[in-house]
Amino acid sequence: MASNPVFDRIEREGRKGYAGFGNQPTTQAYGQPYGQQSYPTPGQLQDMYNRPSAGPNQTGRVTMDDVVMKTLTLFGIVLATGAFGWIVSDQNRALGQMFWMGGMIGTLILGLVIAFKKTISVPLIIGYAALEGLFVGAVSNFFNDFYGEGLVSTAVVATLATFAGMFLAYKSGLIKVTNKFRRIVTLMIFGYAIFAVVNFIFAMVSDTPFGFGGTGGLGIALSLFAVGLASLSLALDFDSIDQAVRTGAPQQYSWLLAHGLIVTLVWLYIEFLRLLARLRSE
């Protein structure tokens, strides 16, 4: 997981001991140092025995429930700001383009800050979700107007179906995330990110809607590759969440895990939009 700055951090902190676990100074019972040893009474022992074991919430570790709740929270923010971006774009095309470009540039900058910031900033993650929603709403409205109604709803259904399918494939063991698998997919993501930037510049300069390949066979093949890559990224997200829960990552990391999952889902949705638009343009 060396290529993932988020889980690089988790691995380092795991070796040190999360939230103070595992690396405490050696003391005797009740925190008394050597030379001042004391023993609990039979009543104290019975009371300790009767107490329930401390769960992840009591020890400040991330749980699956934490990640689910944070993911739903961020997803709700994306939906709310997305609806606002759609409505504004529908009424004012110029302002919609500002949401589109501003959201794209803003999420790029915030995403880098969140990934490499030493501490986890919940406000930054929430701000990212809000900007991402504006971007998604504006882009969705554009595709709906230019490529026909029904395209957006089809992309939404395709995204949710892919998410469910990848989750079942991961949980059933059909897809196994090994270190080699993670390295290969991560390198492919970095390579595609570079290509996407070059393609965006080419599309702007050449005034072509999709850049390289256009709406021809090459363009459709590129979109299919992007959809497949985004789908495989979901498996990495599922495995990262499992590893964080299993290794006892700090509870605060649930925000970062949820953020990563939402980013992948939005990426997958955008790639489905592009693929469907290319197919309709044929």
Image (tube, rainbow, N blue to C red):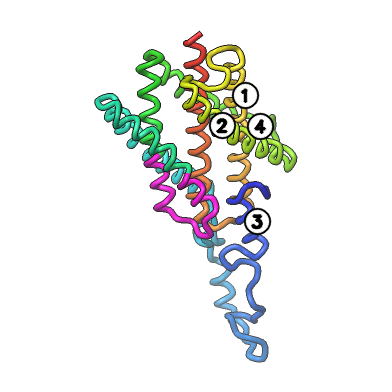
Q: CA distance from mark 1 to mark 2?
A: 17 Å
Q: Nearer the viewer, mark 3 or mark 1?
A: 1
- The residue under label 3 is 11
Does residue 189 appear in this view?
yes
Characterize the magenta stretch by its predominant secondary structure. Answer: helix
Crowding at dot 2, Cα within 10 Å, few <14 / some 14-19 / many 20+, comes out as few
Marks 1 and 4: which is nearer the front?
Answer: 1
Q: CA distance from mark 2 to mark 4?
A: 38 Å
Query: How many other residues sit within 10 Å of disc 1, few (<14), some (14-19) or many (≥20)?
Result: some
As for residue 174 lying within the magenta part, the answer is no
For label 4, the SS is loop
Q: Which mark is residue 172?
A: 4
* Gap in angstroms between the C-alphas marked 3 and 1: 31 Å
Amino acid type at circle 2 is Val
| Residue 174 percent coordinates (x, y) | 69, 29
Query: On the image, which quarter does residue 49 sit in?
Result: bottom right
In the picture of the structure, the residue carrying the numbered disc 2 is 198
* Residue at mark 3 to residue at mark 4: CA–CA distance: 26 Å
Viewer-proximal residue, 87 or 11? 87
Q: Dot 1 lies on which element?
A: helix
Task: Specify start and end residues of the magenta stretch as a single range.
Answer: 109-131
Give residue 144's quadrant in the image: top left
Q: Position of residue 171 (x, y in %)?
A: 63, 34
Please give the label number shown on residue 175: none
